[in-house]
Image: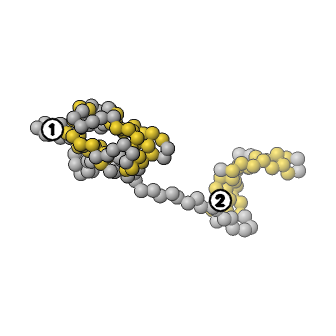
Amino acid sequence: MRKFKFKIKNNQYDVDIVNIEDNIAEVVVNGTTYHVEVDKKIQTTKTPMLVRAKAEPSTDAHKAVARTSSPSEPKGTGTIKSPLPGTILNINVKIGDIVKIGDRLLTLEAMKMENNINSDKEGVIKNIKVNVGDSVLEGDTLMEIGS
């Protein structure tokens, strides 16, 4: 809604333009609503809509796979994948280390920012697939964690 103040013959008018369709404008003048016909067609600007693909985390679990496991299955097994492209700056664990959820595994530099990659599972580091200085892409497997 656009608001205007007009002064006509020393009389003050507060005008709110509520809606414009084709050449008919709905205006409120000092609290009274009027439908006004405009001589020329008013062009309304359309704001383009930005459409982006839905962002999904690059984890090792597929959407169709349940996030819970049966009691007999080993817990905490899986892979740690790179959340974004970058360069490995530091590896904080070695093969055989026991990690808990939230432990810092490595540091990844992406877009001139250092990002800590933390464990999202518990277990033992079974394999480290990257070295310091390696460039990785989003979704690349960085480590394997087993029980």
Residue extending farthest left: 72
Q: Secondary structure at mark 2?
A: strand
- Can you give x and y, in whole percent of width and height, for residue 28 in the image? 70, 50
Rendered location of residue 36, percent (x, y) = 71, 60
Residue sitting at x 44%, y 43%:
109
Along the horizontal axis of the image, is 84 left or right of 17?
A: left
Q: Nearer the viewer, residue 48 or 8?
A: 48
Give, as a three-letter code, the residue at label 1: Pro
Q: Nearer the viewer, residue 47 or 85?
A: 85
Q: Position of residue 114 (x, y in %)?
A: 45, 39
**Residue 84 appears in the picture as rendered:** no
Q: Nearer the viewer, residue 34 or 78?
A: 78
Q: Which mark is residue 20?
A: 2
Task: Give the quarter of the image for residue 118.
Answer: top left
Residue drawn at 22 percent across, 48 percent down: 65
Question: What residue sits 42% from the left and 39% below the top?
Answer: 115
- The image quarter containing residue 98 is top left
| Residue pointed to by mark 1 | 74
For the residue carrying disc 2, how many other residues have a C-alpha within 10 Å: few (<14), some (14-19), or many (20+)? Answer: some
Q: Are marks 1 and 2 in contact (CB under 8 Å)?
A: no
User: Residue 83's spot in the image, x, y percent?
Assistant: 37, 46
Q: Residue furthest bottom?
A: 40
- The tag on residue 99 is none
Residue lying furthest right: 9
Q: Nearer the viewer, mark 1 or mark 2?
A: 1
Q: Earlier in the sequence, mark 1 or mark 2?
A: 2
